[in-house]
Every structure is written in C-alpha cells, then in structure tokens.
Image (cartoon, rainbow, N blue to C red):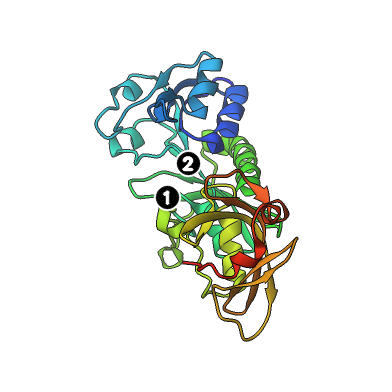
Amino acid sequence: MKDLKVIFMGTPDFAVPVLEELIKNTKVVLVVTQPDKEVGRKRNLEASPVKELALKNNILVFQPEKIRNDYETILKTPADIIITCAYGQIIPPVILNYPSLGCINVHASLLPKYRGGAPIHHALINGDDKTGITIMYMDEGMDSGDIITQEEYLIKNTDNVLTLHETLAKMGAKLLINTLPSIINKTNKRIKQNENLVSYAKIIKREDERIDFNLPGIVIINKIRGLNPWPVANFLLNNLEYKVLEARFLPKDNQIPGKIVVVNKNELGISCQDGIIYLEKIKPFGKKVMTIKDYLNGVKKEELKEYKIN
C-alpha cells in the first residue's frame, strides 16, 4: 500500500489517528481541512489538529472556505483514492467522481444509524448499549453511501464523550487500514444502507445542553454522560448556570421535579421525575470545575433550598 496515493480530508482530533495510520501505510499527497479559526479573546488563528499533523509531516495542506466552489487544487493532485473522516463539509460530485478507487469515509456509528455530525453524543444521550465504526463509500447524500465494513463497540457504563471519542478514533484508523487492501483489489463488499433504519445525529445546539428535571433520572444521567466533557449539560440555579460533568441517580417515588431535596457537607441532590440526581462534579458560573464537596464548602447550604432551578 505504500504506493497508494491518498488525498485525506478531515479536521478535528477524531481524524488524527486515521491520518497517522495513512501516513505510515500509504503516500498521503494532500490534506484538505477546514480554514484556521479564531479562538480566545484575542481571536488568534488556530490550525486544525489535522493541519498540524500534516505540516509536521511536510504534507501539502489545502483549506477551502467552501469546497463546493473551490476544489481545483484537489483535481490537480494525482491520487488513487480520497479518504475522509470528520471533514465538516459536504463533498461535491466533481470530487466524488475524481479518484479511480472512489471516496471512502470513516464514520463513528453503525450506519444507517446516526448519520450526521454528532453520532458519539447521541449514542450516549440515547443510552445505547453499542456503537461502532463504519467504513463506507461516499455519495452525494449525508453518510448515505454503500457500507464496506463495520466494527461494533460495546459501550461501557463509564464511557463519556471523551473516552468514546478516543476509542472509536483508534478503531476507525485500524479498521480503515485493514480494509484498504480489499478496496485496492476491488474485492470488498458493497452493501446498500437500509433506508427504513436511518436515524440522524444532529449537531448539539445550545438549547440541547439544558437539563430538564421533569424527565426520568436515567434520561438525565445519559444526557450528562453524552455531553461530558463537551459541550457539557447545564441547569440554572438562582438564574446562574451550573454545568454538570458527573452525577448519579437514586430512584425514589413521589418527587416534585426540580427541587433541591438533599443538602449536607458532601451531597447535593435535585429531584427529578422518578428520583434524585446527586451532583458529583460541576462547574458553577464563573468558577472552575470542582467536586460537589468543594463547592459545598464555599456556600451557605441552608440557602440552597430557597433557590429556584429554572
């Protein structure tokens, strides 16, 4: 595979292990990634993790604002295959039809479940017992191309977005490298997706982060796991935002949702539909992440029950 000329398209940390394996095993001739973005108060430009890896390995980088309008650099680069992983833009047909071996995508779900940009978050938020990686051909739709191969991963109770992100990124890189020989030899499978089983993993919006204590406890815990450590679930207490990174649930009947029902030197519990959510690690407004014990050391516990959870 060392002679395989690859154009790689990707942007975030999730795509880095895939690019690392391609650099080791193939000839990466071009990396396409999103433009540098402004970060912080000084709005300094920051390169994507994929760009940083490419430059470190002296690989040419192309960063179009809108790839549907700016793609000539790709068409002028001789390549056998295009491989994408979390690139962040829809690829136009002119690019899809360019390489002889096609355009291959590494996706972090068991398609056709969770097409879209946030499959890891939604697998956790929905309390799924498994997820995985799909290697697939790209077409003009969003993650709708033919499946080449898949690998399952059983989600652990201790998994959050970070751990699942890291696990699937490594799985995706390994599965891609193991699958490439069959793609090159054109002996790989090509399985149509069952459109009756399609679901979508929409990008998490600001309003999706708010905890609704009217819901069952397991739903709340899954949301907290599914948004930790980014973008992080939250609630409003006395009109101030509290981010919740870790919590546990204790079932209990006859609760009035959204009230602080347990406060002592080590515990803060908020009632939900069918029990109590005990906060374990939080980020109060304007403060750093801390354990609930450290938070309670610095507040008047008798006042907390008087505050309203919005």
Q: Residues within 10 Å of mark 2 (few under 14, many from 20)?
A: many
- State the residue at coordinates (51%, 75%): 214
Q: In this view, does 237 lie to the left or right of 41?
A: right
Q: Could you say which is closer to the camera, residue 76 or residue 19?
A: 19
Q: Residues within 10 Å of mark 1 (few under 14, many from 20)?
A: many
Residue annotated with mark 2: 105
Which residue is situated farthest in the top direction here? 58
Q: Is residue 49 left or right of residue 245?
A: left
Q: Quadrant of residue 292?
A: bottom right
Disc 2 + disc 1, Cβ < 8 Å: yes
**In this rendering, is residue 19 above or below 90?**
above
Say which label, 2 or 1, has the lower sequence index: 2
Q: Position of residue 184 (x, y in %)?
A: 53, 33
Q: Which mark is residue 238?
A: none
Q: Where is residue 38 in the image (x, y as percent from the top left)?
A: 39, 29
Amino acid under disc 2: Asn
Q: In this view, does 46 lie to the left or right of 304?
A: left
Q: How many labels does the image show?
A: 2
Residue annotated with mark 1: 143
Which residue is situated farthest in the bottom direction here? 254
Quadrant, the N terminus = top right
- State the residue at coordinates (60%, 45%): 165
Q: Could you say which is closer to the camera, residue 43 or residue 128?
A: 43
- State the residue at coordinates (59%, 21%): 2
Q: Is residue 131 left or right of residue 45?
A: right
